[in-house]
Structure formats: C-alpha cells, structure tokens
Amino acid sequence: MTQASIPAPLSPDELGPETQPVAYEASDGVAYVSLNRPEFRNAQNSVMTYSLDAAFVKAVEDASVKVIVLRAKGKHFSAGHDIGTPERDFHVRYENKASLHWDHVDRTGGDQRLARELEVYMGMCRRWREIPKPVIAQVHGACIAGGLMLAWICDFIVASDDAFFSDPVVRMGIPGVEYFAHAFVLGPRRAKEILYTGERFTASQAQDWGMVNHVVPREELEQKVADIAAKICEMPQLGLSLTKKAVNISEDQMGLRNAMDSVFGWHHFAHSANAEASDGDSLGGMDARSMRDSASKKKE
Ligand code: ZN
C-alpha cells in the first residue's frame, strides 16, 4: 500500500458507530470506544492510534459522558502493534499529540525509533492514562503485547472468560512492550515468568494476579461493564476525576512512572542491539521488511 492511499485518522466529528478503524457511540452517560479493524485482529497502526485519540477527545469534551469504555469489535481485543499488515504506516507523518519531540519520518536509525516510540507508543499511552474520566477496558479474545498497553492505560479491566493475554516480545530480544507496567500490574515474579516464557495467561489467572477486576462469560461481558459504568455514572464527575488522579499519583509514587522511563532506555538499547545485529531491523527479524524478505527467500 502506498503512502498516499493510507487514510487520515478520523476526527472527532467523523467518528460513528460503524467507523473504522475506531467506532464511537455514546448513551446514558457512557461513551463506547471500539477498536474496529477486525480483519487484522485490531492490530494498531497509527491511523488507529490517532483515531483512538480523537475518540477519547470526543468523550472528554462531551459533558454528558461520565464514563468511557474501551472495547473491540471482531473476535479479538487487539493483536498488538501493527508490524506486518499492508496498512502498517510507521513511515507516515502524523501530528505529534503526545510530545513536542521532533517527528520521526525524516530521521534515520535510533533517532527515528526513539522519536516515533516516544510519541506513538509511550507518549500516547501516558496521555490516555490521564484522561480525566473513568476508562474501563472491556476485553475479549486475544490481548497481546501492544494490546496490553491499551488495556493497562484503562483504570481497570473487565474480561470475558475467553480472553487471553501475553507479551511475547522477549522473543525479539526486547524486555517487554514500551509501556512497561508489567511488574506493577502482574507483580514482579509473575511479570518475570510471563515475559521469560512468552506464554499466554488466561483471564482467570489475570484476575488471580490482580490485573483483571472481573471475569464473566463472553455473553455477559457487555452487560457486566454496562452495570459497572451505570454505578460510576451516579458519582459526581469532578469527584471521579480527582479520585482517578489520586490513584494515579499513588501509583506513580510507588515508582510506576520512573520505572517506565528507566525501562524505556533498556527497551531502546534492545532495538539498537537488534538493528546492529541484523541490518537495521530493530525487531530482531520480525519487522515487516524482514518477514517479507524471509518469505521471498523461502519461495526461491
Ligand atoms: Zn519499541
């Protein structure tokens, strides 16, 4: 796909119940923001990231919205960051929303990786974590790597019993996805095990470990989230916003923010080490170009 044919991110005015790659609807004080790129298991390209941001802006600006639900259409919540679909758009310039760092597009090597990930991954996740309204993650199916980042920026997670999670990026030599909350949301020992093995963990394991608040049958998921959202809607909006801030401040005082900044450096060392070892491929043989090259070699 050429750069020119990649669509622009949706604006708040364009978002609707069926729009792609993000859908939006609001009723009874609740905004439902849905990842809607099901044919690619909701892999996140930048069109999705910035459309998601537009949806969150719309929900924040709408005074009638008190609670936001982040959910997904299709079989899975999210397969992670888009590293291989035809619409992978890492080379396209987007307006920097999360940082005032320079843009990545006309940069090369580590400069490009750092600029891009500061903005699109770490920066956007932090921006969304600070949304001044409660955000509930409604998770079903796969929630992998970059999918975890989206679930983790929400205030809490409600999952169906078919949900499963993993962060397998250690296979690429990388110590976890960019938004390194692993040790905080899973506990240090379990974080190490799931990272070391790359194995999936289930919704009920995630609940036992404190990462997920509720696990319900798939057919009850929507109603469970709606019931919780309705209770939250009875609270005053400013009180909710201040409470969110209080808990986020506490989490940061426990070290979340500093740990994440520090690990982000090791994360980028891993990208650089991969790039040095394999002709610029920062994902250790798994970026789109490498996969294409190895597929064409197999055909020969
Ligand atoms: Zn990265």
Image: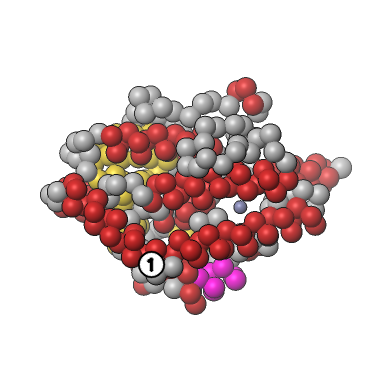
Q: Nearer the viewer, residue 228 or 130?
A: 130
At x 41%, y 56%, the residue is 152
Q: Amino acid at mark 1?
A: Gln
Total residue callouts: 1
Is disc 1 surrounded by few (<14), some (14 to 19) or many (20+) residues within 10 Å?
few
Residue at 57%, 58% (x, y): give it. Answer: 264
Secondary structure mainly formed by the magenta segment: helix
**Residue pushed farthest bottom?**
189
The N terminus: image quadrant = top right
Tell me residue 198's x, y (percent): 58, 66
For the C terminus, give its image quadrant.
Answer: top right
Magenta span covers which residues? 191-197
In reply to whether residue 52 is colored magenta, the answer given is no
User: For numbered disc 1, what is the local secondary structure?
Assistant: helix
Residue 150 visible in the shown view:
no
Picture coordinates of residue 54, whole percent (x, y): 40, 34
Residue in the image at 56% along x and 48% along y: 118
Is there any visible trace of residue 231 in the rendered image? yes
- Percent position (x, y) of residue 55? 37, 35
Instruction: Please tell me which residue lies in front, 168 or 252.
Output: 252
Can you identify the residue that label 1 sits on? 253
